[in-house]
Image (cartoon, rainbow, N blue to C red):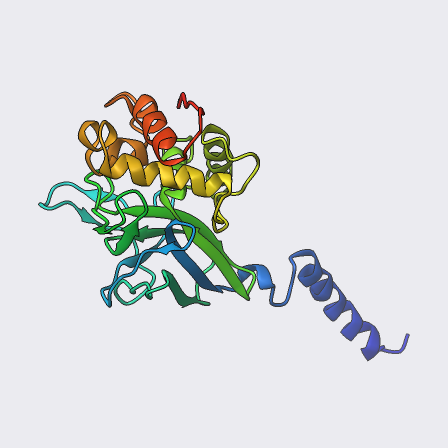
Amino acid sequence: MPWNHSRVALGAVLPLSLLLAACGGGTSSKYEGSILSGQVLMGAGQPVSGNGNGNVCIYAITGGQGNPLNTAVSPPANTGTLLTIGCIPTAADGTFSVNLSSYYGPVLIQISGGTYTNAASQAGSSLVNLASTNASLQAVANIGGGGTVSAVVTPLTTVATAIAQGMSGGLTTANYAAASANVATQFQLGGLNINTAPQAGDAYNMALLGVQKYLVAPPGSTDDPNANNLLTWHLTASPVSADYTTAYQAINSGSTATFGFH
């Protein structure tokens, strides 16, 4: 029987091509990084400015941990894998952008300081790092698929991050999504997504105004300085629900909404 080179070649190549197809051979956009474009807001039209200082730190999340806190040193230091060369500043409008094209997966966005105009006091205010996180505000974003990934960082995304951190598995994309929905429900946002920018007059902005009042006026400001318990969701350390209800009603004129956080 004559030797058939074409049959040998086909027999050698076909299984390899099938194997590549079965394994998703070739380059998949799933494993490409993204440009992370974000904005840090205390309320609608209330950006947090870094004033030229690097106040946005972006960490890889591994094993449910984005940025473990090292309490063996004073002040406590964050020890996660920083994805940029140093932290980057937010612009005057609260925006930031960073190329994470060489990374894919969830990231923890931590805001360390910055200034904004508090709507309750009508005065310039500085964000303070919370002792339990060594950050002022937080959020989670999922990087991958190429293109641009948008993120918003607010006090409510900070609460969602704290809740997700305490769930089984820690900081995963699924846990953060579930925690975000939970926060939207507990702050009575009527279906609004906390990972989009608040708008003047909407329920999200009303909730953020409540946080700002809580920060600067009793009983919230005295029972819970810097809103540490509220933002890290330590609800038994002070009367967070009652104090937030007082703040919310005071700044949102005519509101009778009450809150029973859990």
Q: Residue 53 at x, y = what percent?
A: 22, 64
Q: Residue 250 at x, y = what percent?
A: 34, 31
Which image quarter holds the C terminus? top left
Say whether residue 139 is visible.
Answer: yes
Identity of the residue furthest to the right in this view: 1
Residue situated in front as seen by the camera: 255 or 44: 255
Identity of the residue furthest to the front in this view: 254
Q: Is residue 165 left or right of residue 4?
A: left
Q: Residue 77 at x, y = what percent?
A: 17, 48
Q: Is residue 18 left or right of residue 179?
A: right
Q: Residue 64 at x, y = what percent?
A: 39, 41
Residue situated in front as seen by the camera: 242 or 172: 242
Which residue does the image show at 73% across and 61% down from the upper left?
Answer: 18
Say whether residue 105 is visible.
Answer: no
Identity of the residue furthest to the left in this view: 74
Which image quarter holds the N terminus? bottom right
Image mark count:
0
Q: Is residue 91 left or right of residue 6?
A: left
- Above or below residue 34? Residue 139 is above
Residue situated in front as seen by the camera: 33 or 198: 198
Q: Is residue 249 left or right of residue 229?
A: right
- Above or below residue 17? Residue 110 is above
Which residue does the image show at 84% across and 77% down from the upper left?
Answer: 3
- Residue 19, picture quadrant: bottom right
